[in-house]
Amino acid sequence: MEYAVNTTLDTLAEAYIILADLGLAGMLDGGAMEIRPNELLDALFAKKRLHEFLALITGSAAEEMGKLRPSEALDIVSAFFLDLSAELRCLPGILTSITSARPTPPSAK
């Protein structure tokens, strides 16, 4: 089955919470990450946080995500980060226009 991924602000907020809980917030905010493989695998699989993350980004039920093959789960996660990257590509232009639109302080004139 084909799944569409969501990159709405609500989805990003919830995704950040899950990733931060897993010690992977750096995937969204660019911060440093220290990965502890045993703890990460326990959270992803034993606690089904991967199911939860996949359900969140696809708008599906976590139980449905448990039926995916690992390669299908990877495709969905990859699609999420690719879509997110595409959404955020415009930020440098926005930041430049905001910075250049600031009034010059009187002392700098």
Image (spheres, rainbow, N blue to C red):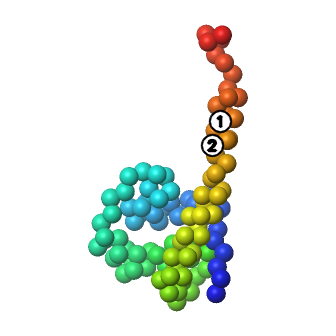
Residue 63 appears in the picture as rendered: no
> Residue at position x 50%, y 82% from top?
71
Q: CA distance from mark 1 to mark 2?
A: 6 Å
**SS type, badge 2:** helix
- Which residue type does callout 2 highlight? Pro
Q: Position of residue 73 (x, y in %)?
A: 52, 79
Q: Residue furthest bottom?
A: 67
Question: Please, is residue 47 above or below residue 92 in the view?
Answer: below
Q: Residues within 10 Å of mark 2 (few under 14, many from 20)?
A: few
- Which residue type does callout 1 highlight? Thr
Among the 4 quarters of the image, the one containing residue 1: bottom right
Q: Is residue 37 left or right of residue 60?
A: left
Q: Is residue 81 left or right of residue 25?
A: right
> Residue at position x 55%, y 70% from top?
78
Q: Position of residue 98 (x, y in %)?
A: 67, 34
Residue 70 appears in the picture as rendered: yes
Q: Which mark is residue 92?
A: 2
Residue of label 1: 96
Quadrant (top left, top right, bottom left, bottom right) of the C terminus: top right
Q: Are marks 1 and 2 in contact (CB under 8 Å)?
A: yes
Q: Which of 63/71 is in front?
A: 71
Among the 4 quarters of the image, the one containing residue 105: top right
